[in-house]
Image (cartoon, helix red, strand yellow):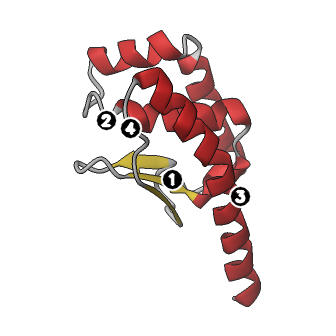
């Protein structure tokens, strides 16, 4: 159990260090303030956005490449502007990342291949 906790702590720190510049980048692109965030041991979601505007990222994001992680951050930050998955939300994703559907599919494929519980 100690080793598992150490690995989770390592992943959490690595995700934080990778997310910080992406939060700054997407904050500028979307013209919103950098939101508060945390990295948690979420087993069912890559990320989430609370109604109060707090973002959460799974420590499992460590397995994502830079483009995939950038998409996750964009997706959650887009919820600061559109708090649903409507056509307006998807248009916002497309405006800022025209390849978002391809990236999203690659994440879903990764989930299936790795058998992650996400």
Depicted 22 relative to depicted 99: above or below: below
Q: Mark 4 points at which residue?
A: 33
- Name the residue that disc number 3 marks: 14
Mark 1 vs 3, N-terminal side: 3
Q: Residue at x 28, y 15 (%)?
A: 88
Q: Where is residue 62 in the image (x, y as percent from the top left)?
A: 69, 52
Which percent across, then down, holds residue 90? 37, 18
Task: Name the quadrant of the N terminus.
Answer: bottom right
Upstream in the sequence, badge 3 or badge 2? Answer: 3
Task: Give the foreground label among 4 and 1.
Answer: 4
Residue at 45%, 32% in the rendered image: 75
Q: Mark 2 touching mark 4, by CB under 8 A?
A: no
Few, some or many residues within 10 Å of mark 4 (<14, 14–19, 20+)? few
Residue at x-position 25% and y-position 31%: 84
Residue drawn at x 50%, y 15% as measured from the top left: 96
Q: How far apart are marks 2 and 4 (CA)?
A: 10 Å
Which is closer to the viewer, label 1 or label 3?
3
Which is more N-terminal, label 4 or label 2? Answer: 4
Residue 57, label in figure: 1
Task: Indicate which disc, 4 or 3, sits on the residue closer to the N terminus.
Answer: 3
Q: Is residue 61 above or below residue 11?
A: above
Which residue in the protein does label 2 denote? Answer: 80
Dot 4: element? loop
Q: What element carries label 1?
A: strand
Q: From mark 1 to mark 3, how far is it between C-alphas?
A: 12 Å
């Amino acid at each position: 159990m100690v080793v598992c906790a150490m690995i989770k702590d390592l992943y959490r720190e690595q995700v934080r260090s990778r997310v910080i510049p992406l939060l700054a980048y997407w904050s500028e692109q979307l013209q919103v303030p950098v939101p508060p965030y945390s990295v948690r041991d979420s087993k069912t979601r890559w990320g989430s956005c609370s109604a109060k505007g707090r973002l959460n990222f799974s420590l499992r994001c460590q397995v994502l490449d830079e483009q995939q992680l950038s998409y996750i951050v964009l997706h959650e930050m887009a919820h600061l502007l559109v708090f649903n998955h409507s056509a307006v939300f998807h248009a916002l994703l497309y405006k800022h990342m025209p390849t978002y559907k391809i990236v999203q599919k690659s994440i879903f494929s990764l989930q299936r291949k790795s058998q992650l519980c996400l």
